[in-house]
Image (spheres, grey):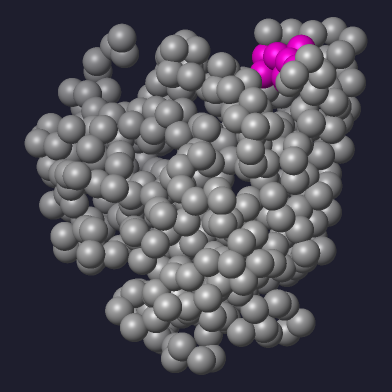
Amino acid sequence: MSSPALDILDLGDPNTFADHDLDGFWRHLRDTAPVHWNPPADGRRGFWVLSRHDDIMATYRDNVNFTSERGNVLVTLLEGGDAAAGRMLAVTDGPRHHALRKILQRVLSPRVLDEVAVTVRANTRQWIREAVESGGCDFAEQIASRIPMTTISNLLGVPEQDREFLLSLTKTALSADDEGVDEVDSEMARNEILMYFMDVVEERREAPGDDVISMLIGSSIDGVPLSDEDVVLNCYSLIIGGDETSRLTMIDCVRTLAAETGQWRRLKRGEVAVDTAVDEVLRWASPTMHFGRSVVRETELHGVTLRPGEIVTLWHASGNRDERVFERPGEFDLGRTPNKHMAFGYGPHFCVGSYLAKVEISELLMALRDFTTGFEQTDEALPIRSNFLTGFSTLPVRFLPDHSGLKEVDR
């Protein structure tokens, strides 16, 4: 992998991330061009790039000069906007955003999710135990793909027989395992997810259950019930958000710990708190590389004028390695504290599912700690191709069993 020059690198192109190591590029931007212009390329519009942690945080907090309602990822921003604006939580601002968020927080609050966490724990420990006892597996396919999809599907009431299908669609919607998947395939996958949930919403209107979809159907804002479209778009957001971040973080976590044996030993010996380790795993993986905003009022940053209608992208991939905020940001340190990572965004749009993601990652760490003495990567991991998400779609590993841990009866 090479470090490209500023003027030839296009952050709108997924191949940029597959073909280059960008650490040096991000460092150069943070030091010399914290507000960088990514010029138009291949028919795509140009856009601004923010790389410093503090600038990203300030922009997330600022809902006066910036909006999410024209899209919050490059793929929709560059296409001219998000059709779900004003209806899906992630691309809604103002009072309606507040009201929608309140509805979703009711079902994704720690109090409600404590019951869900019991199932996450049981599933994670069972699947890790089985993988350890069989010697190894493709961790990405057999474990990391199952934990979050099972959890979010249970919450939404998605039947078990549909989950593999939905998982394949979420993978294609925002990232690809190979170069054969293009933007048309991704758009078709996004539409298929929407159509799937349209059918489910129809079923739940006929026969409500105790799942999130039924709860959304029964909710209203200012006395007006949520429409089918409102419910479907927020289901789409939950299934994508509930799967991708956790899955890619888990894969990166196991890959990194297999290489960082010193950090693994700290976890195994109980020398670092699991909660602290989870935050470092999230900072290190930064699976969502960016989110985007559109300028609504002219504003200035580092002497650069940002004009209404322009796209501004906020790069967690850079902010989570900012030397101005993190000591030794290039080191993976499970004991890192404080840890002001932005894996879940920040401000009004802070990820509504962050608690659930942390539960899933912490249960994974505890199962690995209890059932293995270590693990190693046995073959190359296949990177995904995306300008939004980063990570791997395969991870072959071999587990070394901890026989005393495996004998314990899970409580």
Residue 351, how many percent across, how many down? 50, 38
With respect to residue 329, does 146 lie above or below? above
Asked whether 214 falls inside the magenta stretch, the response is yes
Residue at 24% x, 46% y is 339
Q: Is residue 113 left or right of residue 92?
A: left
Residue 119, how many percent across, how many down? 48, 16
With respect to residue 190, does 214 lie above or below? above
Q: Is residue 181 left or right of residue 354?
A: right
Farthest-out residue, front: 298
In which quadrant will I find the N terminus? bottom left
Asked whether 215 falls inside the magenta stretch, the response is yes
With respect to residue 193, does 319 lie above or below? below
Q: Is residue 174 left or right of residue 246?
A: right
Residue at 59% x, 67% y is 298
Residue at 77% x, 28% y is 231
Q: Is residue 117 left or right of residue 374?
A: right
How many circles with numbers are drawn on the protein? 0
Foreground pick, 293 / 122: 293
Foreground pick, 92 / 104: 92
Highlighted range, magenta = 211-220
Residue 44, how many percent across, how many down? 72, 78
Asked whether residue 37 appears in the rendered view, the answer is yes
Asked whether residue 130 appears in the rendered view, the answer is no
Question: Dominant secondary structure of the magenta stretch?
Answer: helix
In which quadrant will I find the C terminus? top left
With respect to residue 49, does 402 lie above or below? above
Residue 389, how many percent across, how many down? 54, 58
